[in-house]
Image (cartoon, grey):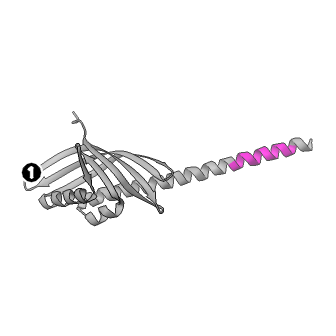
Amino acid sequence: MTSRVARSASACALLLTCSCLGSIIAANRAREVAAVEWTLRNFNAALTRGDTTAMRSLVRPDFRLIEDSIEYDLPNAVAAVATAHAAGTLTRQVADLKVEAKGPTAWATYHVHATFASGRDTLRFARLESAVLQKIESRWTIAFMTSSPTAPQH
């Protein structure tokens, strides 16, 4: 009888341990996803403001962006943002952000609804964007992004 009680106690302890580990893993994953989302939302805000210093701080030095079949490295992406902001005002709203994080790598997809105003003209557009991030020294940085137009909504 004593060995049956001991086995039951051991099984109960094992279940509690597994449950606690599962909770710890889930909490850690949620923190990582939140940190990735923070990086992407701050990058989006930097684009909106034309803040190229903040942009540079959120990406890897070897950052690449593919937008409408054109590849940009970091200096060219920064120059394009600066040129756009010199010509007008940009607004961007991120929606449907989906993030996966595994170890030091994360990837995300999201929609952007945006406007670009220059003088009296305003252009509204929607994009589907994706990003790959790398965690370096406990900080998520964007390594690669794509941006392409989405089909018009009817």
In the rendered image, the residue lying farthest to the left is: 120
Q: Position of residue 120 (x, y in %)?
A: 7, 53
Q: Which residues are magenta?
A: 5-17
Q: Residue furthest right?
A: 1
How far from the left and from the top, in percent, is residue 43? 32, 58
Secondary structure mainly formed by the magenta segment: helix
Q: Which residue is disc 1 drawn over? A: 121
* Quadrant location, the C terminus: top left
**Residue 138 visible in the snapshot:** yes
Q: Is residue 92 left or right of residue 130?
A: left
Q: Residue at x 30, y 61 (%)?
A: 55
Q: Is residue 17 left or right of residue 89?
A: right
Residue 26: percent from the left, percent from the top? 56, 49
| Magenta run includes residue 8 | yes
Residue 89 percent coordinates (x, y): 17, 58
* Residue at the bottom extreme of this rendering: 53
**Quadrant in the rendering for residue 127:** top left
| Identity, as a three-letter code, of the amino acid under mark 1 | Asp
Residue 97 in view in this figure: no
Asked if the magenta segment contains residue 137, the reply would be no
Instruction: Indicate whether 35 appears above or below 12.
Output: below
| Residue nearest the viewer, comparing 61 with 86 | 61
Image quadrant occupied by the N terminus: top right
Position of residue 153 relative to residue 111, above or below, is: above
Dot 1 lies on which element?
A: strand
